[in-house]
Image: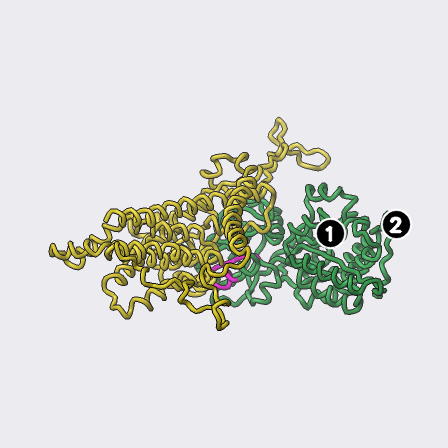
Chain colours: A yellow, B green
Amino acid sequence: MARATHGALAIRDFGPRIETCVQVTMRNPAIDPFGQVASPFGPGAPHGSGGNGSSSISGASKPLFGADAVLGFFVRMSAAIILLMMAALVIVLVNAAIPSVRMFGVKFLVTSSWRPNERTIPGAIKLNENGKPIIEDGEVQREEEKIIPASFGALPVIYGTAVSSLLALLFAVPLGLGAALFLVRIAPKFMTPPVSFLIEFLAAVPSIAYGIWGLFVLAPFLQNHLEPSLNSLFGHVPGLRWLHLDGAVTGRDMLCGGLILGIMILPIITAVSRDILKAVPRVQIEGTTALGATWWQTSREMLRYSRSGLFGAIMLGLARAAGETMAVTMVIGNSAQIHASFFAPAQTMSSLLANQFGNPESELHRSALLEVALILLLMSLLFNVVARYLVVGKSARSAAAH
Amino acid sequence: MMSFLKSVVALGAGLMVGVSAQAADVKLSGAGATFPAPIYQRWISEYQKSHPEVKIDYVANGSGAGIGAITKKVVDFGASDAPLSKKDIVALGGDDKVVQIPTVAGAVVVAFNLPGYDGDLKLDGPAIADIFLGNIKKWNDAKIAALNPGAKLPDLGITPVYRTDGSGTNYIFTNYLSGQSADFATKVGAGKAVEWPTGQGGKGNDGVTAIIHDTKGAVGFVELAYALQNKVPFADLKNKDGEFVKATADSVSAAGEGAVSHMDKSLAVNIWDQPGKKAYPISSFTYIIVYKDLAYLNDASKAKTLVDFLSWATSDGEKLAASLDYAPLSDGVQKKVAAVIGELTWDGKAVKPVAVAK
């Protein structure tokens, strides 16, 4: 649920600030765009059901005793508690991951065997001088058996997360930027609000809904129509043979996971890049047009002008793709093996967690899962920080420069 | 959370009723395995009908959680699909302190999806191991054909499907295959969660069933009930006596009966690959775990009720098992179980189970 609202929150978060930039850059900065709008809590706004002035909330005329202190305390506590929860999350994850970090160190990130169980290798049969098995008390004598302890290497899931997210970007970036450019430059006025709303609404669809659609519609379509022919094609084209899967295609694989993720990050990429493109100063567009640029050349100039913001939008999409769990778990096939072919099942960090966290085999297994969660958290944090820097920081600076 | 709320409500109710409450209500709580949860709920509701003063709560939160809960004594009984490991037993205080009571038996079936193939499919342990190791890649492989003379198996790729979450089903299946194929034992091994070399994973019995149902050429392992309820066909397996057996309540009970001879003090025996012409090879018990001395319940009436409930469930209650696609305990096993329940004590003294009409 939290993931589903993530996109919408992020959009809202950036929206107003970008809007403000637009206002500042595109109008005379001396006129406060909000100057003429009465504050909703201003003296003129009728509030409350009572008829006389004493019951309306009207500015500072009749403060309730202690209300300032209570509200002040409440809002400070709210902020503090949210920060504390973040800190607690990180501390708990780090603490729980310590046994696994100690045990595997860097090997955790670069080895690819995720095996929660111990394996027992029976010892070799003891042979006598003549090369015959030694039998005592009617039993064949063996060397001592070897127990291979559990091992946890997160490389396959890191690879799965990276590749499925990149596939998602490959699919969502052209579509998202295209739709954003359409909305900003060519969409007729009456069309912009409903199309924008529908695109943003996609971000509010719960991920389980995408998952079910992926499982019952997309995966069977891929298995029956697209993948068999593509797979055999890849098998025959030299240079593309690495994409060929030697086995049955199932539709629940890296490609399907990437496509579902692509659909899920489409709204955030579209909405944020639309706002970024809107923020391109009119002088830029008018300037290029005045120089005789065609529609295409102006658009290219717009994209170039706001490239860092657009890159930020893509990073936001990437952050969502990397952390998305439910839908991708349902369609990616959940096999912690690295295959070059996109038609092979794979697994992401989040789907590994969703699958195995409930019933871990051992404490070490639990610790290893929590280390994966920690890596995921740090990765999301990194993506979001970079995106925030690029989207908000750059727009604010470019606004200040003009 | 729910149990906390419930206890708050119960406390409130208790205070209101006060001293006037004559027959003190007996409350028991259990937690653990999800696989037997439907039959446990059925037993509880039937038992509560005939014993209105008793209230039993069972939370199906997984075998591992059930073992953890009884180890910490936060529940009155735990439940697990896999028998306790040596480590678990040490944590519970040792072999003579803890009792594992088989309640019903279940089967893991090898379900498949072969479009246009209506006949029975016959498989044996080594062939299944080779499929899950990726050594057998096509349905018309010579090894499968040899087990199914005359059958027209398609030239179709095999997609093995397994459980990605830690589960008793994985435990039973991998243990069975490790016994059937040395290759499997060394390359994959046995456990609640293992590393599968090929194929694709689903979460839970329902997840695996859904993948098999939707994927042409898929073969996977699920609990019998899930295959029956979703109408997914499953293979006849070759048992220790060389017979091909379909998984049914009868053939699973037969596997349990086959294990009676090597049940000693502990009833936690594995019943996969048991002798007997009718025995289904991938069978297993599911267990309720209690301490041998029931003093930890802190209430003699709770101890009596628990003993009575367990004796009823594992005798008369077994008649309800088949209707929910579980295999009842065979007579031989029921006798062993009754003996063990009879040895449960309260502060060192025997707790006599209320006589159950048989």
The structure residue drawn at horizontal position 66% and vertical position 65%, both measured from the top left corner, is B325
Q: Quadrant of residue A205?
A: bottom left
Look at mark 1 in the image and give the residue it sits on.
B289
Q: Is residue A396 on the magenta stretch?
A: no
Look at mark 2 in the image and give the residue it sits on.
B349
Q: Would residue B5 be found to the left or right of residue A218 on screen?
A: right
The image shows residue A110 at horizontal and vertical percentages of 45, 38
The image shows residue A286 at horizontal and vertical percentages of 17, 57
Amino acid on which disc 1 is placed = Ile
Give whichever of A42, A272 is nearer the camera: A42
The image shows residue B224 at horizontal and vertical percentages of 61, 61
Q: Quadrant of residue A137?
A: top right
Q: Is residue B146 visible?
A: no
The image shows residue A246 at horizontal and vertical percentages of 40, 51
Q: Is residue B218 on the magenta stretch?
A: yes
**On what subunit does the disc labeled 1 rest?**
B
The structure residue drawn at horizontal position 48% and vertical position 56%, both measured from the top left corner, is A2
Q: CA distance from mark 1 to mark 2?
A: 19 Å
